[in-house]
Amino acid sequence: MSVIYALDLIGTFVFAISGTLSAANKKLDLFGAFFTGFITAIGGGTLRDLILGNFPVAWISDLNYLLVITLGVIATFLFKGLIMQLKRTLFLFDTIGIGVFTVIGIEKAISLSIHPVLAVIMGLFSAVMGGVIRDTLCNDIPLIFRKEIYAVACIVGGLLFLFLKYLHVDPTVNLFVTVICIIVFRLVCIRYKLSLPVLKY
């Protein structure tokens, strides 16, 4: 099992928990919670692959994704109190997840001869669109449209990944440097309450 594949499964697991928690907060039933967790975990990657014409999409050809999503939903139902106490840990894994999904999206786009700049956008889609769908289903304003630095961190990390790839840095080293960059970027922005300007009317 490669490092990026293992981190991809971890990110999928955490995103499934994130979606299930959102569903629980809206008092959805078990099916609603599973559907929300599922779409949060695979939404970004599925949309990316559909845009790129990359078939079959990852979770269709690998049952492990469905397995970790199911485990994430069940774990949330059984241990919601404990999971809520581990918000900082979940935040860390969530950030790792968006970092890994950003890299996977860029790599897939580049492998299909997509322009590097557009590849960064595909990386962004991989990382955040599952959360956008989750928030939309739960009738919330998507996180990327609020003040917290989220999508911007993916873009910065994606550009760094391309730069290091251009310098022929080892792919595993590049992955970890990119993910760490995204984590640090988000933490610094949250710590010092940095955000993009808000459009007011």
Image (tube, rainbow, N blue to C red):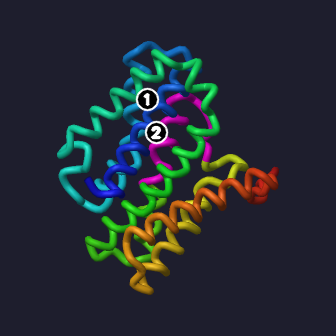
How would you rate the neighbour count of disc 1 (Cα within 10 Å): few for under 14, some for 14-19, many for 20 or more?
Answer: many
Position of residue 4 measured from the top left corner of the image (x, y, whole percent): 35, 57
Q: Earlier in the sequence, mark 1 or mark 2?
A: 2
Q: Which residues are magenta?
A: 126-143
Q: Which residue is mark 2?
A: 15
- Tell me the kind of residue under disc 2: Phe
Query: Where is mark 1, residue-wise?
Result: 36
In percent of the image, x 43 and y 29: which residue is there? 36
Please state which of residues 19 and 14 is positioned toward the viewer in this rendering: 14
Q: Residue at x 70, y 49 (%)?
A: 148
- Residue 57 x %, y %: 24, 50
77 in relation to 136, above or below:
above
- The residue positioned 44% from the left and 13% from the top of the image is 29
Choose between 150 and 14: the one closer to the eye: 14
**In magenta stretch: residue 140:** yes
Q: Report if residue 139 lies within the magenta region.
A: yes
Q: CA distance from mark 1 to mark 2?
A: 10 Å
